[in-house]
Amino acid sequence: MKEIIEFRIFEDYYHLLSKPNNALFNGAVYVIKVEKGDRIFEEIKQLSLDVKLGLLRPEPIYFCSQAFRKMVEDEKLCGFEFEIANIE
């Protein structure tokens, strides 16, 4: 008898897995049932490790001008986090 494992993958990370796979979206997460020897099992294992190590960012990254950043800080708006990058 083969061991089948069920994984729940957040929508933000699902696009990182190879297709086709047998995942079903239940409205909140993708549910995937795989055997231990299956190729997708190793992908999910690596994805889980990357998430735990903080190597993946599910939130989108937006580029903005210095003027926009200054306005956000001056108005004390919340929900923004800035990282300074010099782009030439």
Image (spheres, rainbow, N blue to C red):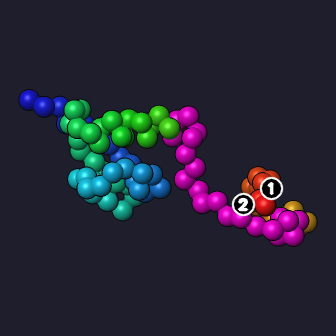
Going by the numbered disc 2, the residue's amino acid type is Gly
Is residue 65 among what the camera can see?
yes
User: Could you tell which of marks 1 and 2 lies nearer the N-terminus?
Assistant: 2
Up/down of 65 relative to 6, above or below = below
Q: Is residue 77 left or right of residue 18?
A: right
Residue at coordinates 42% horizontally, 36% vertically from top-left? 46
* Residue projecting furthest to the front: 88
Please state the horizontal and vertical placement of residue 73, each as a whole percent of the image: 87, 62
Q: Is residue 86 left or right of residue 28?
A: right
Give yes or no for residue 55 being in the magenta stretch: yes
Disc 1: CA contacts within 10 A as few (<14), some (14-19) or many (>=20): few
Mark 2 residue element: loop
Can you tell which mark lies on residue 86?
1
* Residue projecting furthest to the right: 74
Residue at coordinates 26% horizontally, 56% vertically from top-left? 20
Q: Is residue 37 left or right of residue 50?
A: left
Spatial separation of the CA atoms under disc 1 and disc 2: 22 Å
Mark 1 residue element: loop
Residue range in magenta is 51-71
Q: What residue is disc 2 on?
A: 79
Residue at coordinates 32% horizontally, 59% vertically from top-left? 25
Please state the horizontal and vertical placement of residue 72, each as a whole percent of the image: 83, 66
